[in-house]
Each structure stands twice: as structure tokens, then as C-alpha cells.
Amino acid sequence: MTQVQTRPAPHAGALGRDEIRRALGAVQDPELDEPITDLGFVRSIEVAPGARGAAVSVHLRLPTSFCSPNFAYLMASDSKDAIAALPGVGTVTVELDDHHDSDLINAGLAADAGYRGTFGHEAEESLDELRWTFRRKAHTAAMERCLTELLRADRNLAEADVGQVLLADLPAGRAKDALVRRREALGLPLDPAALVLVDDQGNSYPAETVPLALRRARSTRISIDGNAHFCRGLLRTRYEGSGADQTDRPEGAEPGENHTLLPITVKENA
């Protein structure tokens, strides 16, 4: 099933799998907050010359046949859009393999029917609403990671005091970089004097509610990290050799994670 894009092909000859994979690296699993390329969800990429540009065919795979259809459609749709935006692309085929709604999703993508056009009355939310829901969760998890790292590094910092931590107080590194990206996606302030512990609207928490807010954020983070490692294990079990396509995820990982199916997370003190 192919959607034809009418566009010039100035650089079609130079377009290859590496360029397609880099474009797909911008597509996130909405629930796991991780690129589909890192998760191993990209099964194959084929690029061939065409009359109006490169003909690109991509197959995606998921950990189970019953993964949420709306998440599956979102990733497949975003993949198609990411590839179609590349200079030199003529036609794009993105298909989801081995899912109970593969036929429906693939037909909707090929017809450019959109999310609601594909699922009809079953589409209770728009894609934009879904994206915002998971952007908020991703921000919550990234925020908690940064604050928990700070608490572990500074034993003199009380949990009740993290409501006053500023972006400038966070050490540079992977966790802070991720938080900045999540804040930017939500339109939250990025200046060094901005408070770290805020809701998705940028509102701070009263001092007496800070510990509870942090615990709720921790629950969200543990859920995302646990699901990410669990889904990685399921994919490796379902598709032999797929582990070679996965990139290590340090968040929430435990020693020997690559050898176990079940996620292991460190329990936090209540």
C-alpha cells in the first residue's frame, strides 16, 4: 500500500537507509518516551530510485500483536510523515507487521485517511490529544529523574525542599538534557531561574504538597521505565535477533537487564 507524494527529487540518488533511519529516530513511542529506532521497532528499510524521487518502504514491528492500536497508528503515521518530509522522497510505504489491526492501520495510512478516518467511532481522541497526554507524562518522568538524582547526590537536601530547585541547580548531563527537551515540547520556561518541579502548565506546588507531587511523579517515571524494559524484552522474545537493533536505555536499567524479560526497578522509600 503506497501513498504517492508529488515532489521533486533533487537528491534522490543520495538518499539511503541511513538517512531514513535518522529521520525515523525522531519518531517516539508515545508511551515509552523513546525513539522507535532505539527500541528496535523498525524491522526493515528499503530505498529504490523512482521517477519522482526515491521509493521508500518501511516495515515496523511491535512487542506484541495486541499493543494499543492508537499508539501503533501514531508511530506509523509519524514515521510516514518523517520520511515524506525528506528531500528526494517520491513515494512512501509504511506498514505495521503482525498486529491485530495491521490491515486496518495499513489501509488507513495508504489512503491518508487520518486517525479518525481509520478508526471511525473507536477514535475517542485526536492524535494531537494523544501526543499532549504523553508529552505531559514524559515531562513528569524527566522532572522526577532530575530531582531524584539531586536528592541522591546531596544528602543534605530534603525532599520537601525540592520545590525550590531551579534549572540552574541541576548538573549537566543526559537527565537534564531530556528534561529541557520535554519542557520545550510543552512550552515551559527554559531560563536557568525557572523552577524544576512544576505541572504541565508551569505551575509550582505549595511547599506542603511537594513530597506528594514528587511521589506521584516517581510513580509515572517507574511506570514508563518499567514498561520500556518490559517491551524491549518482549520484542527480543518475539523476534529473534531484534536485540541487535536496540540501543541501551540507562533509565531504569538494572544489571543483567539484557538477560531478563521482566523489568526490575529500585523501590523508593515512601
Image (tube, rainbow, N blue to C red):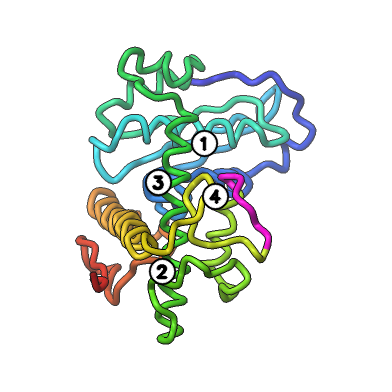
Q: Are marks 3 and 4 in contact (CB under 8 Å)?
A: no
Q: Nearer the viewer, mark 2 or mark 3?
A: 2
Kindly identify which numbered label has been placed on residue 227. Answer: none
Q: Which residue position is annotated with label 3?
A: 41
Q: Nearer the viewer, mark 2 or mark 1?
A: 2
Q: Tell which residue pokes out farthest to the right in this image.
A: 10
Is residue 243 visible from the viewing direction of this image?
no
Q: Which residue position is annotated with label 2?
A: 250
Q: Earlier in the sequence, mark 1 or mark 3?
A: 3
Q: Nearer the viewer, mark 4 or mark 1?
A: 4
Kindly identify which numbered label has been placed on residue 202. Answer: 4
Kindly identify which numbered label has been placed on residue 79. Answer: 1
Q: Is residue 89 left or right of residue 121?
A: right
Q: Is residue 173 left or right of residue 60?
A: right
Q: Residue drawn 55% across and 66% down?
A: 176
- The amino acid marked with disc number 2 is Pro
Q: Is residue 43 left or right of residue 12?
A: left
Q: Is residue 196 above or below residue 119?
A: below
- Answer few, some or many: residues within 10 Å of disc 2's Cα (few below 14, many 20 plus, some between 14 and 19): few
Q: Are marks 1 and 3 in contact (CB under 8 Å)?
A: no
Q: CA distance from mark 2 to mark 4?
A: 27 Å
Q: Residue drawn 44% across and 72% down?
A: 161
Q: CA distance from mark 2 to mark 3?
A: 18 Å
Q: CA distance from mark 4 to mark 1?
A: 30 Å
Is 190 magenta? The answer is yes
Quadrant in which residue 268 is drawn: bottom left
Measured as percent of width and height from the top left, residue 78 is found at 51, 34
Q: CA distance from mark 2 to mark 1?
A: 25 Å
